[in-house]
Amino acid sequence: TLNSSLLFISPTIFHYFRYLNDVDYYGGFEQEDLDQLFEAMQDNYKAWCSGFAPLAVGGDMDSVAVQEFSRTLFNMRPDIALSVGQTIFQSDFRHLLCHVTVPCHIIQSIKDLAVPVVVSEYLHRNLGGDSIVEVMSSEGHLPQLSSPDSVIPVLLRHIRRDIVV
């Protein structure tokens, strides 16, 4: 196989997992929420970036992690960012989860605006192979930026194969 195991951080796998709530699935967003998000991106992209970055990263605008993430958002053309955002937030690849058969280690922030813990639990239940979920005390969707001291030991344990799934 191409990969002997996978590690997901804040599991928006394929980066297009599923953000939209469904009858039997909680992704964290209703369609109206996404419509407002897309409208805000279109109306004033810079203002949207300034508001979204601290929420996504889990910090205030003074933090280095938020500033770095903001910079990457500001560097995108607004029309491209909107197109990417619509693709990410509107896609649904849940039907492919059963085809992921290698062991998976899922790490998740306790408080993640984009991916609630129940999404990691759903992923764990629906993958085609063994998996483990590890919820960290970090906040934000990008714990590798906001809490690297929490993420690095988990990554090292995974690399050293000290995580049993």
Image (spheres, helix red, strand yellow):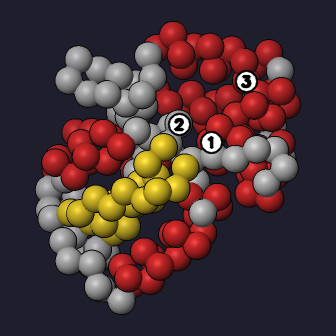
Q: Which residue is the site of mark 3?
A: 41
**Residue extending furthest top?**
32
Question: Would you say 52 lies left or right of 131 here?
Answer: right
Characterize the local packing of mark 1: few (<14), some (14-19) or many (20 or more) Cα atoms within 10 angstroms.
Answer: many
Q: CA distance from mark 1 to mark 3?
A: 15 Å
Amino acid bearing label 2: Leu
Quadrant (top left/top right/bottom left/bottom right) for the C terminus: bottom left
The vertical placement of 105 against 75, above or below, is below
Q: Which residue is the site of mark 1?
A: 56
Q: Earlier in the sequence, mark 1 or mark 3?
A: 3
Residue at image position (46%, 57%) is 137
Question: Would you say 75 lies left or right of 14 here?
Answer: right
User: For the residues carrying marks 3 and 2, which lies nearer the camera in this image?
Assistant: 2
Query: x, y percentage for residue 90?
Result: 46, 27
Amino acid bearing label 3: Met
Q: Earlier in the sequence, mark 2 or mark 1?
A: 1
Q: CA distance from mark 3 to mark 2?
A: 17 Å
| Near-viewer residue (110 or 72) | 110
Q: Earlier in the sequence, mark 3 or mark 2?
A: 3
| Near-viewer residue (140 or 123) | 140
Query: x, y percentage for residue 8?
Result: 39, 60
Query: x, y percentage for residue 85?
Result: 60, 33
Q: Which residue is the site of mark 2?
A: 113
Amino acid bearing label 1: Ala
Q: Are marks 2 and 1 in contact (CB under 8 Å)?
A: yes
Residue at image position (20%, 23%) is 24
